[in-house]
Image (cartoon, helix red, strand yellow):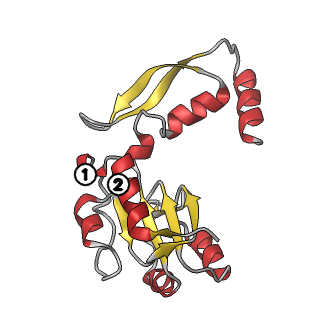
Amino acid sequence: MISIKAKELYKKLDLEFDIKNIDDDWSFMNFENDFITPEFKKKYIGLVLDNAQDINKVYTVTFPDKEIIQQIIDKDERDILLFSHHAMGYIASDEGFPFHDIPLSYMEEMKKRRISFYVLHSPLDNYSDYSTSVSFANALGLEIVKPFCKYDDKIKVGVICKTSLKSVGEIKELVKKAVGTI
């Protein structure tokens, strides 16, 4: 099994995504606990839970939903990094605010099992090689023209694309081919 020192990995991620120059806003999270790192409580980006000395495996998610975290816990693995686009779980069917904190009981279990948690929201939305929008447009074979809008003076997001497709049905088939289902 290949392992990397956790602090080395976090440092590489911090540098690659230039988090010292980017702020995010997860201020609506519950920070009334000792699990979340002081740095995340200030900048809302990067390392959320620092629980591992070494990282043996990385899981990636869009949202750290309880069901996903539970699957990792059920595998009874240790020295894991959970790398996420968002810092909170998301339930679209909920009335009102759809974001949900990771429950403290899960954070306790993650600490016991040495599961760290790292979040990059704006850097993954940012118009770059890592952008979710750019990646999806490229997977669809669309010609990217320019970013769609800005979060702030540093972060450009979304894409405006050109295509020869003429109907919603053609777009649906293209997405189905790229993603596997609709």
The vertical placement of 164 against 48, above or below, is above
Quadrant for residue 157, please give it: top left
Q: 19 and 91: which one is in front?
A: 19
N-terminal label among 1 and 2:
2
Q: Position of residue 45 (x, y in %)?
A: 33, 57
Q: Amino acid at mark 2?
A: Asp
Task: Give the amino acid type for the residue marked by disc 1 in the picture.
Answer: Lys
**Residue 171 rendering spot, x and y as whole percentages:** 70, 25
Helix or strand or loop: what does disc 2 sit on? helix
**Quarter that holds the N terminus:** bottom right
Residue positioned 25% across, 66% down in the render:
39
Work out whether 166 lies above or below 7.
above
Task: Name the residue tied to disc 2.
Answer: 14
Is residue 111 found left or right of 154 in the rendered image? right
Residue at image location 49% in from the left, 88% down from the top = 112
Q: Position of residue 24 (x, y in %)?
A: 30, 52
Q: Is residue 182 visible?
A: no
Residue that appears at 42% across and 59% down: 119
Image quadrant occupied by the C terminus: top right
Badge 1 local density, few (<14 within 10 Å), some, or many (20+)? Answer: few
Taking the image as shown, residue 107 lies to the left or right of residue 113, namely left
- Reading the image, the residue beneath label 1 is 20
The answer to whether mark 1 and mark 2 are in CB contact below 8 A is: yes
CA gap, disc 1 and disc 2: 7 Å
Question: With 84 as the anchor, is 176 left or right in this view?
Answer: right
Write down the quadrant of residue 58 in the picture.
bottom right
